[in-house]
Image (cartoon, rainbow, N blue to C red):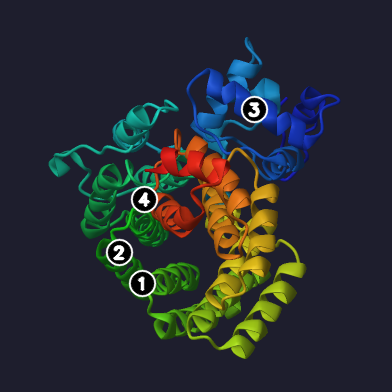
């Protein structure tokens, strides 16, 4: 029998058997790979299912679970019927999609969902196609409903999942089309205010996600434009969470562009927006963004103060108020961002210690971040006077680049190669340079 709202899903717990939540999450990811699906399952997600917080999985997880347990329906796994998952709790569940209330709306939902999310192959070529929207906006509904809002939200999640797996380069051009359609839906208006609020938040988050793809693929002007669009959307909708997200990414971009003072200001603005949200992890991330700006300004004292705030907020742990997009922010990311601060301050050996911890702590499922952290490690080791270790780390990044496409990571690796040229007589360094050039 399906679990009732807010009650534990004891059926799913029994199906997990003797596996730990982390072990079972690994089995889910493996099953997803078998059918060409893309899910980002971890122990936390399994816990949310078993606690009853996730009453009905999204369509990707549904396909994976039914593949794992052939012959069973969702109800046999302890889930509630999709049509019963409505209202505020359903909207807050990042992995459940409301069902439209009328046949015509259902048809529109199906068209939009296929347009946003069709496919699901793990290959980059097929995955980018899954983000393609209908080019003819005349086929969009005259007024957006819950199904359209859900389609926009699904597109945001899919982009994030694909970026985690494959990096930004091949996704950016494809992802721009869903963004245009999301704003077309917003311009068309919604059937009710709650739906319009969801569309504003969804379109803004999509703008941040597309901006990040531009950012990570070296298109800084495009990224700046998308982040500004997200910020404007947040302010129109009075969405403090979206505003904080936009400022966080703007601070990151400013740091990467060498505009350190702007990075500090943007991070501080994000902190002001985030104060009322009740998420220590978000405040921690914004403090790290600020620390990066201070490091770029060579203000060691201010950087250390911001880092101390970041660690204090991080130590408060996770919260129900943590935004969905912050799923990437764990101990590994904290170590990575701190490594960048010490590197900017010229303390490369100290930076390398943090970068090594980041690479070691990162879940291998997030291939792009493993590549990024290891590239940071290689660069720090090269500048810290450890060329052989740097070459080893650089070689590992080259292996990862077979499945991850990120201009940012390649640029970092190119800088490391340049720093290692004086040591090219070392066999390990020479072998790395031969592969990297």
Q: Which residue is mark 2?
A: 220
Asked whether, in this view, residue 19 is left or right of residue 323, the answer is right
Graded by Cα atoms within 10 Å as few (under 14), some (14 to 19) or many (20 or more), the crowding at tag 2 reads some
Label pair 1/2, CB-CB below 8 angstroms:
yes
Residue 214, numbered label:
none
Q: Which residue is mark 3?
A: 28
Q: Position of residue 63 (x, y in %)?
A: 53, 23
Residue 257, numbered label:
1
> Which quarter of the rendering shows the C terminus?
top left
Q: Residue at x 69, y 48 (%)?
A: 360
Name which quarter of the figure residue 384 lies in: bottom right
Name the element at disc 3: helix
Q: Which residue is mark 4?
A: 407
**Foreground of the two, 14 or 103:** 14
> Which quarter of the rendering shows the N terminus?
top right
* Of callouts 1 and 2, the N-terminal one: 2
Q: Position of residue 406 (x, y in %)?
A: 40, 47
* Of callouts 1 and 4, the N-terminal one: 1
Asked whether, in this view, residue 210 is left or right of residue 319, the answer is left
Q: Residue at x 27, y 42 (%)?
A: 174
Q: Position of residue 30 (x, y in %)?
A: 62, 24
Q: Position of residue 62 (x, y in %)?
A: 56, 27
Q: Residue furthest front?
A: 425
Q: CA distance from mark 4 to mark 2?
A: 12 Å
Q: CA distance from mark 2 to mark 3?
A: 36 Å
**Foreground of the two, 267 or 181:** 267
Label pair 2/3, CB-CB below 8 angstroms:
no
């Amino acid at each position: 029998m399906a679990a009732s709202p807010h009650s534990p899903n004891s059926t799913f717990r029994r199906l997990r058997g003797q596996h730990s939540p982390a072990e079972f999450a690994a089995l889910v990811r493996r099953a997803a790979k078998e059918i060409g699906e893309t899910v980002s399952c971890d122990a936390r997600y399994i816990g949310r299912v078993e606690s009853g917080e996730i009453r009905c999985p999204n369509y990707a997880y549904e396909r994976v679970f039914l593949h794992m347990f052939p012959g069973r329906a969702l109800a046999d796994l302890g889930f509630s019927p999709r049509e019963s998952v409505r209202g505020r709790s359903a909207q807050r569940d990042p992995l459940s999609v409301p069902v439209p209330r009328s046949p015509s709306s259902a048809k529109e939902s199906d068209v939009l969902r296929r347009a946003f999310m069709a496919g699901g192959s793990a290959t980059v070529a097929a995955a980018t196609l899954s983000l393609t929207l209908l080019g003819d906006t005349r086929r969009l509904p005259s007024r957006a409903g819950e199904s359209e809002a859900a389609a926009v939200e699904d597109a945001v999640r899919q982009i994030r999942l694909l970026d985690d797996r494959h990096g930004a380069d091949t996704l950016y051009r494809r992802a721009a089309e869903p963004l245009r359609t999301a704003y077309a839906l917003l311009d068309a208006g919604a059937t009710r205010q709650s739906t319009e609020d969801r569309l504003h938040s969804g379109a803004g988050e999509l703008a941040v996600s597309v901006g990040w793809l531009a950012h990570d693929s070296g298109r800084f002007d495009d990224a700046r434009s998308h982040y500004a669009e997200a910020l404007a959307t947040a302010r129109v909708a009075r969405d403090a969470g979206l505003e904080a997200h936009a400022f966080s990414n703007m601070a990151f971009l400013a740091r990467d562009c060498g505009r350190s003072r702007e990075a500090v200001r943007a991070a501080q603005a994000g902190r002001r927006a985030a104060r009322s949200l009740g998420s220590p992890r978000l405040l921690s991330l914004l403090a790290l963004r600020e620390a990066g700006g201070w490091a770029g300004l060579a203000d060691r004292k201010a950087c250390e103060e911001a880092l101390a705030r970041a660690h204090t907020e991080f130590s408060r742990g996770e919260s129900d108020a943590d935004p969905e997009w912050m799923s990437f922010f764990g101990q590994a990311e904290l170590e990575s961002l701190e490594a960048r601060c010490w590197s900017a301050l010229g303390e490369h050996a100290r930076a390398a210690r943090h970068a090594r911890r980041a690479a070691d702590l990162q879940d291998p499922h997030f291939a792009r971040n493993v590549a990024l952290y290891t590239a940071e490690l290689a660069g720090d080791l090269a500048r810290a006077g450890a060329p052989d270790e740097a070459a080893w780390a650089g070689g590992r990044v080259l292996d990862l680049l077979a499945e991850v496409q990120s201009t940012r990571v390649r640029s970092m690796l190119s800088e490391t190669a340049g720093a290692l040229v004086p040591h090219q007589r070392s066999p390990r360094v020479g072998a790395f340079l031969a592969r990297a050039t």
